[in-house]
Image (tube, grey):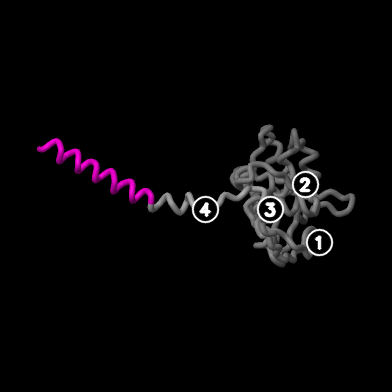
Amino acid sequence: MNPCHFSDSRRSFLKKTASVAALYLTPTLLVKAVAADAIIPLPIPKEKLHLTINGKVFDLEIDARTTLLNLLREQIGYTGTKKGCEMGQCGACTIHINGKRTKSCMQLALNNQNNQITTIEGLAKADQLHPMQQAFLKHDAFQCGYCTSGQIMSAVACVREGQAKNREMIKAYMDTNICRCGAYQNIVDAIEEVAKSGAKI
């Protein structure tokens, strides 16, 4: 092959490549730079939400991205519902929605239009503790206490749904609630006692 011919071909290829690149790069280079602090974000639109929490009716306007957990803790002040993993794995944020246990970190608040919500604050009647709360105290079914509200909410649902007929059933139902202190034996003892007592929960 003629070295000159090879050189011309290479030179021609490079020119074509540069021309194509210029077509893509030129518009970008012509865009006027804008300072970040000059960009004014639009306000996030609010959505209306009507629901009942612990027997109290709430009519709210909230950010559509708000989780039920954040609504309860940060906007309404029911801090008994705890933030744990925020991935639905630990059970610390367990509440009841229309009587069914639910992990509130996995729920958008807006998905609960007109729902009935019960948190740990809604179990006791004035100064009278719920039977499950009394049983947890009696059996020392907690240590640090961080997971306790979620454990109790799941425990109530366990008995209410007929899943506490024996210890193995209780363990299976409660396995999505993590106790990092390891109070599992005492938790099962408390649930078993309430289930056998026939207390209305």
C-alpha span from label 2 to label 3: 17 Å
Image quarter (top left, top right, bottom left or bottom right) of the N terminus: top left
CB under 8 Å between discs 4 and 3 = no
The residue labelled by disc 2 is: 80
For label 2, the SS is loop
Q: Amino acid at mark 1?
A: Gly
C-alpha span from label 2 to label 4: 52 Å
Q: Is residue 128 magenta?
A: no
Q: Amino acid at mark 3?
A: Ala
x and y percent of residue 79 in the render?
78, 47
| Dominant SS type (magenta) | helix
Q: Which residues are magenta?
A: 1-22
The residue labelled by disc 1 is: 55
User: Quarter of the image holding residue 7?
Assistant: top left
Q: Is residue 20 above or below residue 53?
A: above
x and y percent of residue 175 in the render?
60, 43
- Mark linked to residue 157: 3
Image quarter (top left, top right, bottom left or bottom right) of the C terminus: bottom right
- First in sequence: mark 2 or mark 3? 2
Q: Amino acid at mark 4?
A: Val
Residue 192 can be seen in this image: no
- First in sequence: mark 4 or mark 3? 4
- Mark linked to residue 31: 4
Query: Which one is in front in this view, the residue at disc 2 or the one at disc 3?
Result: 2
CB under 8 Å between discs 2 and 3 = no
x and y percent of residue 184 in the render?
67, 37
**Left or right of 19 in this view: 91:** right
Q: Amino acid at mark 2?
A: Gly
User: Quarter of the image holding residue 56?
Assistant: bottom right
